Amino acid sequence: LTRLYGPLTALSNVRVDVMSALVSFDRVFEVLDLKPGIAEKPDAVPVPAGSGRIEFRDVRFRYPSADQVSLATLEDVSTLDRTEQEEVLTGLDFTVEPGQMVALVGPSGAGKSTTSMLVSRVYDVTGGTVLVGGVDVRDATLESLRDTVGVVTQDSHLFHETIADNLRYARPGATEEQMWEALTGARIAALVRALPDGLDTVVGERGYRFSGGEKQRLAIARLLLKQPSIVILDEATAHLDSESEAAVQRALAEALRGRTALVIAHRLSTIREADQILVLDKGRIVERGRHEELIGAGGLYASLYRTQFTEAVI
Ligand code: ATP
């Protein structure tokens, strides 16, 4: 029997190890986003817990071409010659101090999403440095970076699993009480409580289908469970019904409180509240300041404001 069970037990232990490695490596859906060439150095150091400062120093970036990525091995993508590709960030310098909210605005294609992706090291810079908590993100352990930087995008991924499983990707070992607390903060607890299977409701294509606004609130619940000190937020441009919109706004206000936030901003209310607005155009910062100052300056921001900003959404 031992001979029979020995290997089986060993095998099931392997599975447990692999699963916990995956989960502790945070969080599968974020790991899936990592691009080729993003690897941890053998002598990587952790980002200090609770770090809230983001610094960009003369950051330049070109996307690798699709051919290069498919030809490259994991190791050599960083050494590829990308000079054929257009430079999409051409020397960004800015600092977000701990607890500040900085809004990125600018025309389509200006480089807002690219800038936000460099903070969580979805890609590596091709020049200059991105620092989180004083550590060059290329020198940081991936796990500490994932723990420090939380990302809420417009299309957060939900796995075809239960709501509880989806929440545990953000915090393995979260108790039911902690999950309800996060769902309450994200303004989605009442809806989950009303489902016949509650936290055990299976979601996704073949399960319960959440609306866009509900998915966003679940993403915010994940953020509240994970408690990162820095939040990267891509504000929704998709039209939500006004009730959903208001709920998402309240949930976000709670999720961002006390945290450093870098927001790709589409809402006037966010921009007005920002400690600093960075106006990007063709991969560079062309203006920076607060709303009133920038309106007064009469430059790109003022013209974006006139032509693109509607009452609530730009
Ligand atoms: P939008 O407001 O439309 O989302 P944005 O300001 O966020 O625009 P980015 O998405 O950062 O701009 O794009 C900056 C530039 O990089 C654009 O010229 C875009 O075409 C290019 N780009 C974006 N993603 C890729 C990619 N994966 N490969 C190659 N080029 C890309």
Image (cartoon, rainbow, N blue to C red):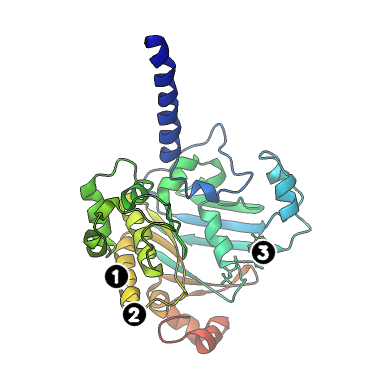
- Ligand 1 location (quadrant): bottom right
In the image, residue 177 above or below residue 264: above
Residue at screen point 39% across, 20% down: 9
Label 3, label 2: how far apart the Cα atoms are: 35 Å
Looking at the rendered structure, the secondary structure element under dot 2 is helix
For disc 3, the marked residue is: 88
Foreground tag (1 vs 3): 1
Residues 93 and 5: in front is 5
Q: Earlier in the sequence, mark 3 or mark 2?
A: 3
Q: Which mark is residue 305?
A: none
Residues 206 and 106: in front is 206
Is disc 3's CB within 8 Å of ligand 1? yes
Residue at screen point 51% across, 56% down: 55
Residues 110 and 292: in front is 110
Foreground tag (2 vs 1): 2
For disc 1, the marked residue is: 250
For disc 2, the marked residue is: 242
Q: Earlier in the sequence, mark 1 or mark 3?
A: 3
Q: Quadrant of residue 64?
A: bottom right
Label 2, label 1: how far apart the Cα atoms are: 12 Å
Position of 53 with respect to 172 (left or right) is right
